[in-house]
Image (cartoon, rainbow, N blue to C red):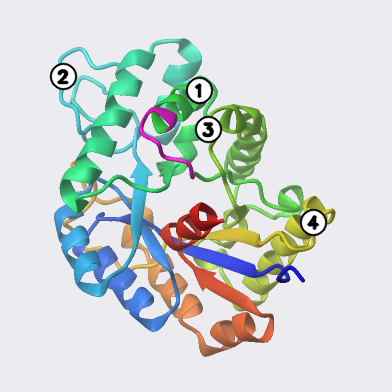
Amino acid sequence: MPAPACRCLIITADDFGYSEEKNAGTIECFKSGAITGASLLTNGQYAVNAVTQAKAANMPIDLHLNLTEGLPVRRIKCNSLTGEDGFMLGKMGFRQAMEDGSVNLQQVKEEIQAQINRFKELTGHLPVKVDGHQHVHVIPGICEVFAEVLEENGIKMSRLSIEECIASQKWSSHQQEQFMQGVVQQCIQAVPIFTKHGIWCPGFIGLKTMGKDMTIARLSTCITDAFRSQREKTQRNPTTDLVCELMTHPGKQTGKSGGCGNGPDDFSQSVDREHEMDVLMSEVLLQFYKDNDINLISFPSYGQKLMSK
């Protein structure tokens, strides 16, 4: 008789390598069982420190592709990814440049490959999964290049931030609401592109639970909704594992040093990251996983499981 499906949750801490404080908080969360891995900014000022600590803690890490913040890994003249100051164009600036048609997609491809190469240089291996800092990997035009590079490198896992009931969320501003809903729509449009290139993505939780919006009650609801959605998609095969990723940003509050070359941002210097640490490490939340038979896993461990089938 086939084994019943497992409910598996991958808990990823983004922005690893951003600052010493961010790194320390991420490692603390991993050691407490609150996260299962982290996503590394290879152009983060503390990327080397991050990898050293991850290896010491035996914490899995993957690649957090960054095309928007700080200095690019590949330094070239006349780089369409940067401004005159040499720094990348920012979350909205890069998106505007894409709309204007001023971004050279060949340079995008080369930067993506450079960050994959840098990850391998730092860790000794290719990432098993790559996602995008500020969801840059699903921007129309970037998405196709991103998927091609992953396939060329044999990387078969990524992230699609398609969260349940996103339209009902109350955002802090109209601008944030537009951005988040735009991300979801771009992710939906990316599905056939990722499928074409053999890229698998788990279910997703995380847009509605960032910073101060992260509470145990909200996390519990969002995780339950995500697994319910996964079950509906796989109801024809009840033995199929249900796998979701929870995107998080825990870390200790960053001081004056950090970032990706042009200093730390407001979010990293706020109390929001430490708030996420407190929630994620809560005994109540850890008990919720046990009570609901949710297995905490990492991308590498699930990748090995897929390969063994």
* Residue drawn at the location 25% of the way across and 73% of the way down: 57
User: Which numbered disc covers residue 144?
Assistant: 1
* Residue drawn at the location 50% of the way across and 16% of the way down: 99
Q: Is residue 198 above or below residue 85?
A: below
Which of pointers 1 and 2 lies earlier in the amino acid sequence? 2
Residue 32 falls in image quadrant: bottom left
What residue span does the magenta drawing correspond to?
151-157
Amino acid marked by disc 4: Asn
Instruction: Tell whether 55 sits left or right of 144.
Output: left
Q: Are marks 1 and 2 in contact (CB under 8 Å)?
A: no
Which of pointers 2 and 4 lies earlier in the amino acid sequence? 2
Amino acid marked by disc 1: Glu
Q: Are marks 4 and 1 in contact (CB under 8 Å)?
A: no
How far is the residue under mark 4 from the one under mark 1?
30 Å
In the rendered picture of this protein, how many numbered marks are placed on residues?
Answer: 4
Q: Position of residue 154 (x, y in %)?
A: 40, 36
Mark 1 or 2: in front is: 1
Amino acid marked by disc 2: Ile
Mark 4 or 1: in front is: 4
Q: Secondary structure at mark 1?
A: helix
How far is the residue under mark 3 from the one under mark 1?
8 Å
* Residue drawn at the location 64% of the way across and 40% of the way down: 184
The residue that mark 2 highlights is 76
The residue that mark 3 highlights is 138
The residue that mark 4 highlights is 237
